[in-house]
Amino acid sequence: MTLTGGAVHTFDQAMDALRHGFPEDRAAATRLHRRLARLLHPDTAPPGRRAEAAAAFLALNERWRQHLAAHSTAHLTITTRRHTYVLGGTQATGDLAVLRRAAYEHDGVRHDALLKIPLRPYDNDLIEHEADVLARLDTAAEPRHRAYAPRLIETFRHRDTSGTERRVNALEPLDGFHSLSEVAAAHPGGLDPRDAAWMWRRLLVALGWAHRARLVHSAVFPEHVLIHPALHGLVLIDWCYATATGTTAPVLIERHRDRYPPEIPGRQPVTEATDLHLAVRCMEHLMGERVPKPLAAFIRGCTLPGEAGRPHDAWRLLTELDELLERLYGPRTFRPFTMPIT
């Protein structure tokens, strides 16, 4: 038995739908997955059912991966001027694009890649824009921070069997990483602020580096922040929403409307303060009710309604955060972090 997205409107209906398979039709399956993801996310769960929602959200992600793997075209190839990619299964589907695993050979050596393919051809310009931004980050100051953003292998146009042309970005894969959405779902009671601290620090470094290149990410949401538990690494993804400091954000993601600072829905210029507001909200969401009062006051200062009154310097904010964390928890020490096995 399968359901369509239109048949699922409540949390209980989503829980029931989770027990059934996805439709064979790719578009219908994608719509259903998105609806279930919204209804089952711990942030939208009915009162008293956050833990139940967190477990269901993790199960949904696993079943979606299994569905995509079962319905992928294993040996489809795409040939560009530089490489021939053999496509594998779908790794993830977002608001804008699908990520397909792929492999290619170069000088007789096999390499892995992720192909970012827009779901809708009219988003080709955003995929091309992301390629331009990643190329700009390649030449940004302080190349030691380059690992905080994905690396572009190449960007190209591809025409599928229906004749539809799409811009595709081939990216180096990020194995072993988890989004902050996944981290939050795995810790429905809130993440220990001492564990959130290293993620917060690295996110501020990533933003400080981008801001020195005069770029504002403008979409620092939990699903766009990836962390590597074992390496304590962080990568900020989805740079197709980025823009130059002092310009307006190119896209507003409707489901995040309430999380944006006022300047984005108000179509006002974005600045470094825009990203810092979004980043602090990410960490507040991650810690949930475990935020201590001094950190709560720090968060309020970073999320004031007026853009001019918020912090603009990520590096200075990092120093202030370190000082606050030391007052709360003592000298910084390494804390191993693991994600639960699902």
Image: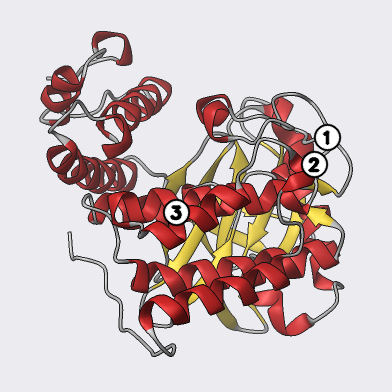
Image vertical order of residue 196 relative to residue 266, above or below: below
> Of callouts 2 and 3, which one flags the residue occurring earlier in the amino acid sequence?
2
**What residue do we see at 79% from left, 62% from top?**
211
Residue 5 in sight here = yes
Which of 304/160 is in front?
304
Q: As rendered, which of 340 and 281 lies closer to the eye?
A: 281
What colour scheme was applied to this rendering of the protein?
A: secondary structure
* Residue 200 located left or right of residue 292: right
C-alpha span from label 3 to label 1: 29 Å
**Residue 126: quarter of image:** top right
Closer to the camera: disc 3 or disc 1? 3
Q: How many marks?
A: 3
Dot 2 crowding, Cα within 10 Å, few <14, some 14–19, many 20+? many
Q: Which mark is residue 320?
A: none
- Callout 1 crowding tier (Cα within 10 Å): few <14, some 14–19, many ≥20: many
Which of the two discs, 3 and 1, labels the residue nearer the N terminus? 1
Position in image of residue 207 (x %, y %):
69, 63
* Whole-percent x, y for residue 263 in the image: 74, 32
Quadrant where the image shows the N terminus: top left
Identify the residue under disc 3.
296
Question: Residue 31's x, y, as percent?
Answer: 39, 22
Q: Residue at x 69, y 28 (%)?
A: 121
Mark 1 secondary-structure assignment:
loop
When asked about the image quadrant of residue 264, the answer is top right
123 or 254: which is nearer to us?
A: 254
Residues at marks 2 and 1 touching, judged by CB atoms closer than 8 Å: yes
User: Which residue type does callout 3 highlight?
Assistant: Ala
Q: Which mark is residue 248?
A: 1
Considering the numbered disc 3 on the image, is that residue within a helix, a strand or a loop?
helix
Q: Position of residue 85 (x, y in %)?
A: 59, 60
